[in-house]
Image (spheres, coloured by chain):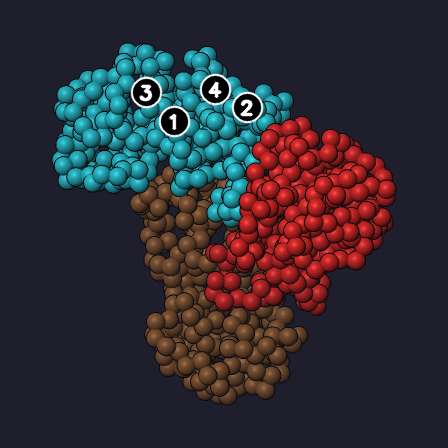
Chain colours: A brown, B red, C cyan
Amino acid sequence: MKHIINIEDLTVEEINQIYNRASEFEKGIRKANHLKGHVVNMFFENSTRTKMSFEMAENKISANKYDFFADTSSIQKGEDLFDTINNLSAIGMNVVVMRHQDNNLIENLSKKSYFQEISFINAGSGTKSHPTQALLDFYTMKKHFMDLSNRTVVIVGDIAHSRVAKSNISLLKKFGTKIRCLAPENLTGEKIEGVEYYTSLKEAFEEADIIMALRIQKERIQEKIDFDEYIKNYQITKENLPYAAFLMHPGPVNRDIEISSEVLEMQNARTILNQAKNGVYVRMAVLDTILNLQGL
Amino acid sequence: MKHIINIEDLTVEEINQIYNRASEFEKGIRKANHLKGHVVNMFFENSTRTKMSFEMAENKISANKYDFFADTSSIQKGEDLFDTINNLSAIGMNVVVMRHQDNNLIENLSKKSYFQEISFINAGSGTKSHPTQALLDFYTMKKHFMDLSNRTVVIVGDIAHSRVAKSNISLLKKFGTKIRCLAPENLTGEKIEGVEYYTSLKEAFEEADIIMALRIQKERIQEKIDFDEYIKNYQITKENLPYAAFLMHPGPVNRDIEISSEVLEMQNARTILNQAKNGVYVRMAVLDTILNLQGL
Amino acid sequence: MKHIINIEDLTVEEINQIYNRASEFEKGIRKANHLKGHVVNMFFENSTRTKMSFEMAENKISANKYDFFADTSSIQKGEDLFDTINNLSAIGMNVVVMRHQDNNLIENLSKKSYFQEISFINAGSGTKSHPTQALLDFYTMKKHFMDLSNRTVVIVGDIAHSRVAKSNISLLKKFGTKIRCLAPENLTGEKIEGVEYYTSLKEAFEEADIIMALRIQKERIQEKIDFDEYIKNYQITKENLPYAAFLMHPGPVNRDIEISSEVLEMQNARTILNQAKNGVYVRMAVLDTILNLQGL
């Protein structure tokens, strides 16, 4: 596990090891001291929680953190990103945490022969992959349900443009969880094997243990969306949210679109903040594992 | 003192406690080690000295500091600032240092029930409040005069748009200092009880112990200002500055508008730099106090 | 050596002292602990490797680092940079690392009487000076050749707009190295004493020990450049690169303009990354020396 690029690359054993470590960090029984580790955060797309969560994880394991600003970097002078990474590696960076709008760039960078000493963590690539988000989502579910193999997760909303959905589906499949996707047809995207598709909220929510709402990725959607229609049929409200359901959302929520404000103020919306909280421990575990493999 | 939002909320006793602590930091007889404290700086308005001063204070008490950039945050995806703060709190931030153009937003955020574990420090809110600036200004005066109760402070310039003036007036009133405001009518703003208003520099400067010039807040002023007229009547020059007066300015100075360059090069302009220097100790004291209250 | 502004200001002895220290850092036999040192990075021009290299050097000597963003600073409110620096000094900054498009501004700032306690490191000034780049380039050459006094260095490309070329020429002259400049006439600039000028690559490369390609500074060049003509006559290719030559480039490379991609993938292009790597040690040595002189 030199890099974390896609959930597909991780074995169940590796994931469980990350979770054991995350849990030790959460309980305060593990400390990591990476005073010699250098981690650069390269976010080519806007971010608050993922970036801040990585920064906090980096501080909590005592790594040195760096902010790479594309706008004031040599990329503005026309530098190739491959050359930038080569240089960061030469300077002594150990880990690149990267978010990029391209589906495959981070993966391609990680495969280039030059960077043999630098590890990549994908912090969100296009509409394809967001592995640490899926890891923290599943960690949050596991803390609540222990065993997810007999549970049903409903993923609701803009599946088509969601890297979060895709990484979560990959991860849930590894652990035998039943997966339902609920979305209007134009937001369903390409169908994935092993997933049940619904267009009716009522049917999808029947016997649901976990409901994971997704953000409508307005910034990625070309065609016009009929928000009134979406809200009428798919918004999660006090009336349609099953009493015992565990409500999740990767954030940021478009208030009163995916979830009503009323539900967001309710107790079970706190899970959403628990996701954020757990993210720090999961990212500490990922960084700690990768830096350990580099002998740090 | 969970938050520092407005000077009005602080008692004389709390202010004196902050000053004792600031003084101990200044003398090097107090050390604070907040390796577990996480402070995020959220500046929605331009800043050099306040932001850098907070950053240095955070480093000097060994807290972990974070930079929040509104331009590359999820606020660009339409996220509500309340949700952003909820998330930062969930991630583990202990203190938000915020500057914002809105007069009341920071106060409103600090009152929202969610953020029970996070403290706010107002680093400048609209034209209303800038409490740490007033605290450092008064700390600077106290170091020079010890007792301010029989002294006269003249605040000169753009009172109307100045949060610095308003917070200083609140603070000076608590300690029984005589306050004069000197400004042309269009920059005087709403009159405050307990303050004497002047339009003649000559009269206002009579028996003045301290002269606090303010920056003309060009960026906040809609109407056209007649700078020639302002300079003629209100610029502080070698000729009109009383010999023994203690000259202050919160910075940045508009050179040759509020104060002549000639005066700025004189010895007593050094007070302006002492304000900057003292600001670090006062902010260390504020952060240390707040983090202590959080058990850190 | 309170400041590092231009190579011309440094003696051979001072340079050798910096190299001894850099070498000790590189071998891991020197540690520096500047927990009380505060260094602010002020980059008014785009940068990746220089900025990141300084940041890593600052972390490795355990200094406190600060990022100054001109775009969100009080410079936007019209503040004079002299006043900004005065304030940063008052707040407690020990070192300013500055890159600026103006040829002389950093030098002028460093000479102003106010800032008696603050040191300046020039991280690139206009088209005139880039002393730490020259220091790391020569350090890289010295590690390979030991003695440079009988060697020949060919500097190829956009000499006219290159601060790297100018600082390198100054440094090489101090150590008695033979210097050739190879460029088309419009990129040659003002001729410097003690340098041999060539327009023919074939002639210039004869008996060359080191070939230092420069980046064509597109962002500084007003007139139109005929890139096809440049490539035909001056691009370094597998065919024209002498077998034993030591190839250098300050980066970022304009791929397939100054150097062919084919050459960049070859083993001897690794020197370019070694330059980046050595830069960290040289900058650690510079910062450590300057902070030591401040008693830190």
The residue at which mark 1 appears reads as C129
**Separation of marks 3 and 4 at Cα, in angstroms:** 18 Å
Whether residue A201 is situated above or below residue C159 in the rendered picture? below
Residue C53: image x %, image y %? 45, 35
Q: What type is the residue that disc 4 sits on?
A: Ile
C161 left or right of B1 in image: left
In the image, what residue occupies the spot 74% across and 52% down?
A: B197
Comparing labels 2 and 1, the label whose residue is closer to the camera: 1
Circle 4 packing at 10 Å, graded few (<14), some (14-19), many (20+), is many
**Separation of marks 4 and 2 at Cα, in angstroms:** 10 Å
Tell if the residue under mark 3 belongs to the same chain as the one under mark 4.
yes
Q: Tag 1's secondary structure? A: loop
Q: In which quarter of the image is the C terminus of chain C?
A: top right
B249 left or right of C68 in image: right
**Separation of marks 4 and 1 at Cα, in angstroms:** 18 Å
Q: Which of the marked residues, 3 or 1, is nearer the chain's N terminus?
A: 1
Decide which of B173, C243 is in the foreground and name it. B173
**Separation of marks 2 and 3 at Cα, in angstroms:** 24 Å
Q: What type is the residue that disc 2 sits on?
A: Ile
The residue at which mark 2 appears reads as C290
Q: Which of the marked residues, 4 or 1, is nearer the chain's N terminus?
A: 4
Tell if the residue under mark 2 belongs to the same chain as the one under mark 3.
yes
- In the picture, the disc for residue C18 is 4
Q: Which of the marked residues, 4 or 2, is nearer the chain's N terminus?
A: 4
